[in-house]
Amino acid sequence: MEAKPENIEIKIDTKSKTPVYDQIKQEIKLLIASGKLKEDEMMPSIRELATILQINQNTIVKVYYQLDQEGFLYSLKGKGYYVKKSNQDREIDKHRMLEELTNEFMEKVLKLGFSSEEIKDTIKKKLM
């Protein structure tokens, strides 16, 4: 088992329509999929993460529970939560997340009325 990560960077957008617990869950998934959180690495305690993010502990309980159910974390009774995913699983998750983020992005920009060409041009500029 590895030690707790020193500084987990989780950003919460209080103006977002996405619930806070879902934002935190997605941020942790990104950290795991990107390899910034390693397999068997200990997560901050529920109390610790709630204090850092200045939110209710029940929110972190919900996040950790759901991540456990989805196979991203596992818990050891009395010891805390740990990262579960292997490198092979991370690659699958990264591609799944890319698909989800792309779908979400496309849905929003198409609702705004942008054409496919405008979207492609903007993406090309960002990639350069």
Image (cartoon, helix red, strand yellow):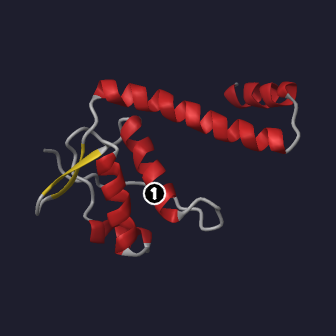
**20 lies above or below 36:** below
Which residue shows up at 72% across the image and 36% down it? 106
Asked whether residue 100 is in view, the answer is: yes
Which residue shows up at 26% across the image and 54% down it? 43
State the residue position of label 1: 24
Q: Is residue 57 left or right of residue 104?
A: left
Quadrant of the drawing holding the N terminus? top left
Q: Is residue 81 left or right of residue 77?
A: right
Q: Residue furthest front?
A: 69
Residue 47 percent across, percent down from the top left? 28, 72
Residue 118 image-quadrant placement:
top right
Depth check: 123 or 76 in front?
Answer: 76
Q: Is residue 44 left or right of residue 103?
A: left
Residue 87 percent across, percent down from the top left? 30, 27
In the rendered picture of this protein, how many numbered marks are placed on residues? 1
Three-letter residue code for mark 1? Ile
Which residue shows up at 12% across the image and 59% down it? 79
Asked whether residue 7 is in view, the answer is: no
Q: Secondary structure at mark 1?
A: helix
